[in-house]
Each structure stands twice: as C-alpha cells, then as structure tokens.
Image (tube, helix red, strand yellow):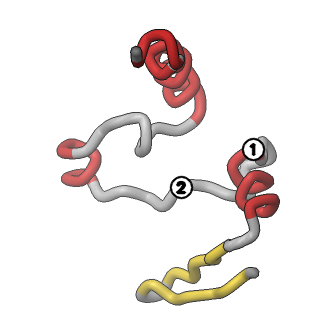
Amino acid sequence: RISLAWFGKAPQLILTDAELVKEVLVNKSGHFSKPHQSAVRKMLASGIVTLEGEQWAVQRRRLNPVFHLEKLK
C-alpha cells in the first residue's frame, strides 16, 4: 500500500490506499507539500496545480462552480 521511491536525492512516497491519499490531500498541518518548482517551470505552467495556500483556495473557489453537472450539460 505504501512504497518509497527516490527521484534523484528526493524521496517520494507512493500511496495506493484511497483512505491514505485522502488523508494526505485533506491534511492541513503542512507536513505534506507540493514539490518545489523551478522558476522557468513556474513561469510556463502556473495554474491551480502549482499554487499553494491562499492563492490555491481563491482559484479553487473560482473554478468550483464550473464543474457542477448542470453547467457541464
């Protein structure tokens, strides 16, 4: 259910259990964070996936109504 892989010098945890994934994604304590992005990558791919904290929350609130079933029909 849990595997460890190394990406260069950085360890990465691979989770296959849905409950553990949910725990990581809902975690508010800051123990789990997104990997750091290079300046070039931030400039070319700045979206909700790369945002954190308050910026992420603002963009998520803006995008949330777009994905309701009624809007998609």
Q: Quadrant of residue 14?
A: bottom right
Q: How many marks?
A: 2
On screen, 14 above or below 61?
below
In the rendered image, the residue lying farthest to the front is 73
- The answer to which image quadrant residue 4 occupies is bottom right
Q: Say which amino acid is labelled 2.
A: Lys
* Spot occupied by residue 12 in the image (x, y as percentages of width and height): 57, 78
Report the side of 22 relative to 38 (left or right): right
Write the residue at 42% across / 35% down: 48
Q: Quadrant of the N terminus?
A: bottom right
Q: CA distance from mark 2 to mark 1?
A: 13 Å
Point 58% across, 24% down: residue: 57
Compared across the picture, whether 43 is left or right of 55 comes to: left
Q: Is residue 25 above or below residue 57?
A: below
Of 73 and 49, nearer the camera is 73
Amino acid type, callout 1: Val
**Image quadrant where residue 13 sits:** bottom right
Per the image, the residue denoted by label 2 is 34
* Most foreground residue, 73 or 41: 73
Which class describes the residues within 10 Å of circle 2: few (<14), some (14-19), or many (20+)?
few
In primary-sequence order, the first of circles 2 and 1 is 1
